[in-house]
Amino acid sequence: MNEAHALTQGTVWAPGRVNLIGDHTDYTGGFVLPIAIDLGTTITWHSTNTSSQFRSDVDDVIVDLDVVPPPSHWGKYVHAVALLLQQQHVDPQIFGTISSTLPIGSGLSSSASLEIAVALSLGATARSRDGIIALAKLCQQAEHAATGVPCGIMDQLIVLAGQSKHALLIDCSSLDMTPVCIPDNLKIVVQFIAHRTLARSAYSDRVAQCTLAQEIIGPLRSAKIADLVALDDPVIQKRALHVITENVRVNEFCSALASGDFAQAGSIMTDSHNSLRDNFDVSTAQMDAAVHAAHAIPGVYGARMTGGGFGGCIVAIADVDAPINGWTVQASDGARLIK
Ligand code: GLA
């Protein structure tokens, strides 16, 4: 339970994530296909005799776990994770220094990355499948407490369970995670579009609308397009249509990748973007323009907004030498102790 603290000092690392396809499906038990990326959060810590404190290189603020409310935005996440771990009697005294290569608030799960890094530095472990799921759920709960956003489980799971050179097909009902190979001759490019926060965004409204749809037609995970006629409200109908079709797209995208049909994979990404734009209303004009521009670049197979939306990033898949701007990200291993 308390691996980090058999030691008196250490370093932990937790990646961010990019979702290749399957957005706004996790909180209704659907399918997602994220990768952990090679940008993330590092915490170097040592034992102390005082209360636990974390300092961030980002703003040079020190957050003391004994002082509530914390004097910074990121401190909310640290406090929320520490509180939940204390309830499990994981409560060491450490001083941790946080640094990050992830752009904050850009839709690459900087908060899930921070939550997992904090949990590991405080001594939480996640070695087995059950351990990974339990820690992901604890950090998801911390995110809910810190932000009020009723996010799904995707971000925390991929941050913990990511695999080098693979995406993870996550079934958000069973929480089964299946590695899906990213071919060497395909690059994944992320373009930052705009800062955003899901707190006070319409994310919660979308969750509520999906819940309403499910009260009428049952789990969206198993619903069919024919079931949509039972939904009188055209807005709720569009939300449900997105989720039902997005779940199908995730699985079709995996098959296209496996058979090396990148053109088909790209076209499925385009359909996903269009559905997030038209049915789920979570894209922005800037994101639409960036996706459109990416499609016009030779060697780009497809592009879409990624994550919760309302800003953030787009993701594209392309030939390795395609002249597309942005960060070429590598599918990476999940969070771990590195020293
Ligand atoms: C955010 C949430 C996730 C997921 C995505 C949309 O990243 O944290 O749980 O719902 O939005 O796919």
Image (cartoon, rainbow, N blue to C red):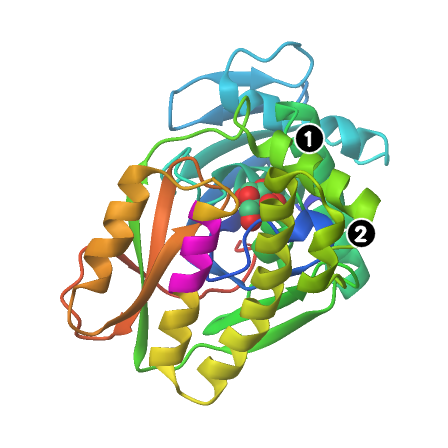
Question: In x, y percent, where is residue 301?
Answer: 29, 72
Q: Main secondary structure of the magenta part?
A: helix
Q: Which residues are magenta?
A: 270-277
The residue located at (60%, 69%) in the rendering is 248
> Hey, what amino acid is under mark 2?
Ile
Q: Are marks 1 and 2 in contact (CB under 8 Å)?
A: no
Q: Which residue is mark 1?
A: 144
Residue placed furthest toward the right: 88
> Does the beta carbon at disc 2 come under 8 Å from ligand 1?
no
Q: Residue 271 in magenta? A: yes
Q: Is residue 239 visible?
A: yes
- Nearest to viewer (mark 1 / mark 2): 2
| Pointer 2 local density, CA inside 10 Å: few below 14, some 14–19, many at least 20 | some
Give the tally of numbered discs. 2
The residue located at (66%, 40%) in the rendering is 119
| Frontmost residue, 331 versus 192 | 192
Q: Is residue 335 visible?
A: no
